[in-house]
Amino acid sequence: MVAAGALLLLPSLADAQTPPRVADYTFTATLDPVRHTVRADGTIRWTNPSSVAVSELWLHQYLNGFSGPRTYFMRTRSASTWPAHPPHWGRLAIESLRTGDGADLLPTATPDPAVPEDDSQLRVALPRAVAPGATIELAVRFTATLPEMVARTGYQGSFHLVAQWFPKVAVLEPDGTWAHFPFHANSEFYSDFGRYDIRIRYPRGYTIGATGPRVEGPALVDGLMEQRHVQEGIHDFAFTAWNHFRRADRRIQRVEVHVLHPPGNERGAARTLDLLSGALPAFERRFGPYPYPVLTVVLPPPGASAAGGMEYPTLITTGSFWWGPRRARDVEYVTLHEFGHQYFYGMVASNEHRYPFLDEGFCEYATARVMEDLFGRGGPLLDLPMLGPRLDAWSWEALGSSGIAHPLALDLGADQFPTWGRYGEHVYSRAAIVLRTMERRLGTRLFTATLRAYVDRARFSHPTPETFYAVVREQLGPPWEAFARTAFGTPWRYNLAVTGASSAREPDGRWRGYAVVDREGPFDLPVNVVFTDVRGSRSVVRIPNDRVMTIVPYDGSAALRSVSVDPEVTLPLEERRLDNARMADGHHAPTLPLIGRVAYWIAFALGSVGP
Amino acid sequence: MIRWISTGGRIGVVLGVAAIELGLAWLLGLASTASITETLSEHPLGFAALHAQGGRLLGDVIALNAQAWAPIGVLLAVAVLAWAVVWMLLGGMFPVLGSTAGVRWHRAAAESLRRAPTLLGLASIAGAGYALAAFAGYAATGWGARTALTRFDVRVVTLLGLVGWILGGALAGLITVWHDTARAHAMARGKTAMQSSGAAALQMAREPLSTVAAGVGYGLVAWSYLGAAWAISGLLDGKTSTAALVTVMAAQHLAVLGRVHARMKWFVWLGQRVSLAKARAE
């Protein structure tokens, strides 16, 4: 047995920053993998973090998002993401909720009347107001019935991913406002930091992976296996159970990393551990220490892919094909993204419902940044020479952003994006590419320092966009704050294009001409214009780029062949890059090889029905 | 041993068929890439832009030409269908060339045209067979997926998922061998569609190793050319020097030539075999 207190947080972090303890949860949870239920009882200890006394509590019971076809989650889901209904619905049923002195709170508890047919929230009236800084303890007993796997929650056969399984106190903001919201299909979560002390009981033969380090067990108690996980400085708890898991472990720096995987995917597990051996130090270099002593990565079994690609504190789910080629780095990308959420969601715990770009967008940026750190220029995502051009992580983000037909502001709430697709292209890709643009303009070192300052300030707190803007103002000055406010807070399109280029020989023997650079969009950041003449000589002109059209004069010893604007890609947030360069009038680039290759593949298709 | 047309004529026919196929492919290539090449010819990198900036420019090209993809798809589908009809007749011509010494290619072509209804009948039966193979593959995939849910080893699950592809592919291969053999019987022995269907099935049943193995062998030879071209183009992928571009294009065009040659040899082999069997029977 290991002493519980010793493994709660790593010493380096415990010394530097103590996370607040607003909501502590102590449960004993018994998994019945045949009925797919978790019966639990225990206590919720909540301390009022605001400056206002409150006489009610809001609990989130998000498992009820999967309790029927008319819940808010099911009504707001996109058909392309989650099924219309899982074959087996889930349910979180609170059977008892009492204060420390025995007052029954259930009779007066009601779902939010503003959201009909949905009980993913519960308003609980308190018998006495809780003063600022005061603490209330609730005794609770409940049964979580898991749905068949949907939205990273539930079961598939004997595999269980137990998430959103307990009533969780909503965040009370400093001004006394409850940040409660129904479970929307676009949205993730928002909770307060605390200490989670969870005993998990389960049948013999199962392997458990859970948030936080195991501090007791597994041991046989009353015919069931029991193990205890304790972790401070977190705001959610999830666990997984399967009777066929294989496990691979590695100590990376001071963190015990466990990979739980299906039989036969030892290669995926090794690949995950190899990746994290480089990724964990890389994240720490850029975004500060990972403060927890453990990380569990779950590779879901066959048929349970809906469990993949999700983050919980110290536990992430990914996915991996055992046969996947190493240079197709989708597994790496997902793993880095979910691990990145340990920072942007886990420690930097912004409101994922209200400002989803603050976790998903920043995490997406961090993912591509570390991809580049680990795998070289651009962060090659798909690099299979025999199967076509390479695709880089940064290009992937840029293309995701450039496809936006009708832009929205990035700082909208998750429920304000009309579809999952529009949510994704803004919140993930566009937010990431805005941050990448800042990095390209400022230099990686300076921007990393700025982002690190933001992470340090926001660690173990609930930052808003204002937190980020303030750090940008302090570190980079008001112009960059203005840039960030425009880029994140307003809808925009942005593009630079060379729309004309020409030169002619003059009587003095010199070639003179011009290039026309059009700008669409709000950012007037200076860029380089590069002229290349027919001999291959290049000349560079810096333009202020403060007008919708700039005519740049050319004066050279040879005819102008081509012009490009911002060839260094300092503005990757552009809608298109293809029109950043153009041949001068009368010149054309070779395209015959393209026709030849297409002709070959057509001949290939013809040959499939012919000779 | 019956020899088909002279070496020079043989090369001429192979080159002719390959030239027709490649010419058609180039015409279609020009038509289908018109909007893209127009875009790329204005970019200083030209064709090489597709490999630049980590796929960013390729993505732009795809997005900018979004409206063109559907018409291009329709054009290519129609062309492939039309070529299938042409090949139905060409496929009938080669067993004739193989079956009788001294038959000129235009006589063989005329014979193939005359027997078009028979060839169409065989093609229809083969089409039904391919549909059946696809259905069998689909059903096997469903079985594999259901069975996979009860297994836990991901390697087994992957193999179960491939069951449909393997079964469907094998059936399609057998149907191709049968179709080609039936064409040879129709053209070299003057049988009807039904008669040649039965004769082909009988031949495959009596001589499974020689007929099926020969078909598979010729198929492998044909695909090995394509594999080699794929490997060469993959190794030189992204390289934009003239030497690299010429090498890739040469490899790809030679692969088409090689594949046409292998397929025609297979037909001629079938024609000779069927003719010899006929001669022995008489």
Image: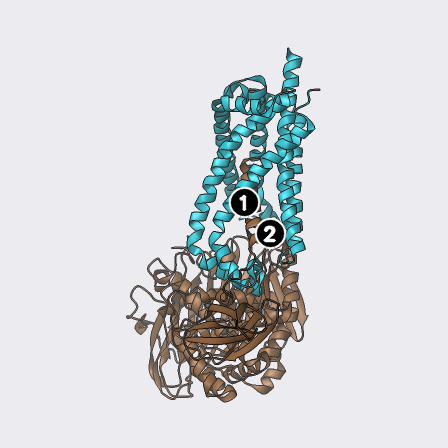
Chain colours: A brown, B cyan
Q: Is residue A32 visible?
A: no
Dot 2 corresponds to which residue?
B154
Q: Identify which residue is drawn at 45% across, 51% down.
A: B69
Dot 1 corresponds to which residue?
B26
Q: Identify which residue is drawn at 64% across, 40% down.
A: B223
Image location of residue B88, percent across then percent down:
52, 30
In this view, A359 is above or below A585:
below
N-terminal label among 2 and 1? 1
Image location of residue A168, percent across then percent down:
43, 73
Q: Chain of mark 2?
A: B
In this view, B161 is above or below A450:
above
In front here: A421 or A211? Answer: A421
Between the residue at mark 2 and the residue at mark 1, the CA separation in whole angstroms equals 44 Å
* Outermost front residue: A507
In front here: A46 or A409? Answer: A409
In the rendered structure, are the residues bearing label 2 and label 1 in contact, judged by CB atoms less than 8 Å apart?
Answer: no
In front here: A173 or A593? Answer: A593
Query: Residue B253 falls in which quadrant of the image?
Result: top right
Image location of residue B173, percent across then percent down:
58, 34
Neighbour class for label 2 at 10 Å: few (<14), some, many (≥20)? many
* Outermost right residue: B1
Element at badge 1?
A: helix
Query: In the rendered structure, which amino acid carries the disc numbered 1?
Result: Trp
Query: In the rendered structure, which amino acid carries the disc numbered 2?
Result: Val
